[in-house]
Amino acid sequence: MFENVNKTPLEDIGEFGLIDRIKSSVKIHHNQTLLGIGDDAAVLNPEQKHVVVTTDMLVEGIHFDLRYMPLKFLGYKSVAVNISDILAMNATPFQITCSLAVSNRFSVEAIEELYEGIHRACDAYKVDLVGGDTTSSVTGMVISITAIGLVNPEEWVGRFGAKNGDLICVTGNLGAAYAGLQILEREKKIFLENPGVQPDLDGYDYVVERQLKPEPRADMIRQLHELAIKPSSMIDISDGLASELLHLCKQSACGCRIDAEKIPIDTHTWKVAEDLNLQAITMALYGGEDYELLMTIRQEDFEQARMISDLHVIGYMTDDIGNCHVIDSQNQLHPITASGWDTFRSQSKD
Ligand SMILES: [Mg+2]
């Protein structure tokens, strides 16, 4: 996908030239950012709040595949996944830093495309790009983003506060990002076997977009705040509902029971499941990369929580430590295990 013909090699402008170009398109959204890119370090003002910090490294060939991931989307997604982690602490993201290692296979234009995606995510979620580093790599690309958020001291939420009887809720719908990945993988395979064939993504736009351009649920955190609901525990769904539920149960010393029929799954995801002979419920449980929020709330907050239209109660926490189950439409109980991924794979056609 990289045609370097007529493109500017990175060495033509050098590291400082690249930083100047990046800096020229940075917008600062917050007064809390006192000094951004261009000095030895950024200066931030946390204004009596607690500071929440997270970092994530993405390596080409391990975490992303540029054969179907356009650079603009990669930039957007790299920022989005970090914002999602800040939100999962019930905090508001304010700044990011971005460090990048690239080989000489990437042109100036390619890096600018990546940064276009980064800037778009910064604008969409009102975060300031305040620093980073660029360096060369022998092969491929590595992106490391650090996100910084703020939260009122009494309002941050960890994975460990759930209690027996708390309601388990998820935002949005699950399994769509995995469905999108399956479609992209299918098209990649066809393309590799027959490079003349154009990808056929017709009717799959929704799931493909969920894979390429996840939107972390800042809107949900805002609504919870407005309704004065503080979740008892929370995590974002990056590795799949099952895995995240096990984290909450383990760190809160609880068990849980969820209802398979209550897990929200979009009609587009059902369609992919049907087309590829996969189980939608398994995709929702084990697929990952949806970047929705999984949280527990106290029962007394239920009436208020019902006012949030895209928040779905799927089960409850129990005091049966370590026993995590999903109940199906025939009232059968299935243990939720971390090895669900393998179960899932063996169900796929190939
Ligand atoms: Mg996370």
Image (spheres, rainbow, N blue to C red):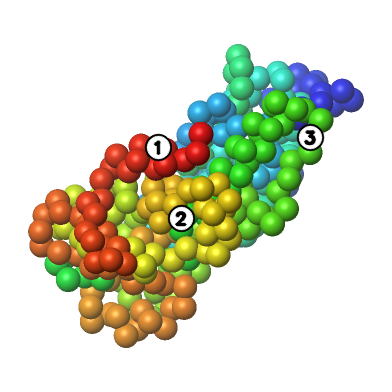
Q: Which residue is mark 2?
A: 280
Quadrant location, the N terminus: top right
Residue 320, horizontal then vertical, whole percent: 10, 59
Question: Residue 164's image quarter?
Answer: bottom left
Q: Which residue is mark 1?
A: 346
User: How many neighbours does mark 1 have within 10 angstroms: few (below 14), some (14-19), or many (20 or more)?
Assistant: few
Q: Which residue is mark 3?
A: 197
Q: Is residue 20 above or below residue 224?
A: above
In space, the residues marked 1 and 3 are separated at their CA atoms by 28 Å
Q: Amino acid at mark 3?
A: Val
Q: Earlier in the sequence, mark 2 or mark 1?
A: 2
Q: Earlier in the sequence, mark 1 or mark 3?
A: 3
In space, the residues marked 2 and 3 are separated at their CA atoms by 28 Å
Q: Amino acid at mark 2?
A: Ala
Q: Secondary structure at mark 1?
A: helix
Residue 321, horizontal then vertical, whole percent: 11, 54
Q: In percent of the image, x 64 and y 31: which residue is there?
A: 189
Residue 113 in the figure: left or right of residue 240: right
User: How many neighbours does mark 2 have within 10 angstroms: few (below 14), some (14-19), or many (20 or more)?
Assistant: many
